[in-house]
Image: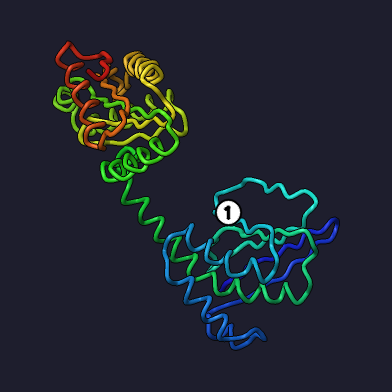
Amino acid sequence: MATPRLSIVTGSTAAEINIEDNRINKTIDSVNADKQSLLELANKLHSTLDMEQLITLFKLDITPILNLDDVIYRLPEDNSTINAKGRHLLSYQLVLHQKGLGEITMIRRTRFSNDELHFIEQVLVALLAPLNNALNYQQALNLASLDPLTGIYNRYAMENMVSREIELTQRNNTPLSMIALDIDYFKKVNDTYGHAAGDCVLKHLTECVHQCTRTTDAMFRYGGEEFILLLNNTDLFGAQELAERIRKNIEQTPYIYDGKSIKITASIGISTFIENDTSSDFFKRADEALYRAKSAGRNQVITQG
C-alpha cells in the first residue's frame, strides 16, 4: 500500500492527508481527474530508469499546470533542508509497500488550493511505481560498481568515472590528477599470515587512504593490491602533497592481526591530465610512475615523466 504523506506548510497552517494505492488503474478509476491524462503520465514516467530524467519528466509535466517555482526530490537518506523563505512548500513523504522512496517538495509563491491538492495527490500515484523502479535500478548499478571486499569503487566504475571527469575537466578548464598505489610485498603478507589477513590489510589500507582524502576524491580497487585515486580540481603539486601524506599514514599505521603487527608500505605513481589525453594516456602515465617507484626501492612517490 502506498502512503504518501502531504504536509502543507503555510505560515502556522499545517495539514496531513494520506493517499492509498495498490494498482495504478484502480486508483485512476477512483478519482475525478482525467484518466487518460494520468495513464499518459504513468507511461511517460515508466519510459526511463534514470532517476534524474524521471524527476525531470515529472517536473516538466506538472510545473506549468500548477505554476510552480520549483520541484525538489530528495532521496530517503537526504536530510538536507530546503530554503524557500517567503514561499509556500508542499512536501510529500513517499512510501510504497512500506518502503520509503524519499520526499518530493513543490514550491511556489501562492497558496495551493484544495482542487490543486487533489490534483497533486492523483499525479503522485503515477510517480510511485516508476520511482521505485528507478531506485532499485540505481541500487543495482551501485552494487555492480563496488568492490565487495573494501566497499570502494571497482575497475568497472573507474572506467566510466574517469571518462566523465575528463569531460568535466575539458569543459571547465580545471586540473585533474590521478594516483596509482600498490601495496609493497603484499604476496609476503598472504604467504606469512594467510589470505584472511591479506583481506584485512586491503581494507585497512583503504581506511588509511580515506583518512587523508576529501569527500570529492574517488578511490577504486583496480585489481589485487593496486588502487587508483581520481582527484578533481587538483594539480600535480596538490596530488604530490596528498600522495606523500597517504604514503606516510600507511607506513606509520601497521595493521594488528591476531595480536601481530603487520607493517605495510605502498609505492605511488602520479599523473596529471594533459590536453588531448585519452583515458588510457592518463592512466598509463600514473601506472608507469608507479612502476618506477617500485623499481626505485618501493615506499615512495614518483610523478609522471
> The residue under label 1 is which amino acid type?
Arg
Which image quadrant for residue 217?
top left
Residue 71 placement, left or right of 48: right
Q: Nearer the viewer, residue 298 or 47?
A: 47
Residue located at (70% from left, 66% from top) = 67
Q: Position of residue 301 (x, y in %)?
A: 28, 15
| Residue 75 horizontal side relative to residue 114, left or right | left
User: Quarter-wise, where is residue 304 in the image?
Assistant: top left
Is 301 situated left or right of 53 in this image? left
Image quadrant holding the N terminus, namely: bottom right
How many residues crowd mark 1 within 10 Å: few (<14), some (14–19), many (20+)?
some
Q: Pinpoint residue 220: horizontal percent, then vertical percent.
A: 31, 36
Give the quarter of the image for residue 33.
bottom right
* Residue 23 in view here: no
Q: Is residue 244 above or below residue 176?
A: above
Q: Residue furthest bottom?
A: 29
Q: Nearer the viewer, residue 266 or 301?
A: 301
Quadrant (top left/top right/bottom left/bottom right) for the C terminus: top left
Nearest the eye: 55 or 74: 55
Q: What is the count of numbered marks?
A: 1
Residue displayed at 69% across by 69% down: 66
Res. 42 visible in picture: yes
Q: At 48% from the left edge and 73% from the top edge, which residue is drawn?
A: 44
Q: Check the image and report above or below for 251 versus 20.
A: above
Residue at x 41%, y 19% (from the top left corner)? 238
Tell me residue 31's x, y (percent).
Answer: 65, 85
Helix or strand or loop: what does disc 1 sit on? strand
The residue that disc 1 covers is 74
Left or right placement of residue 11 versus residue 141 in this view: right
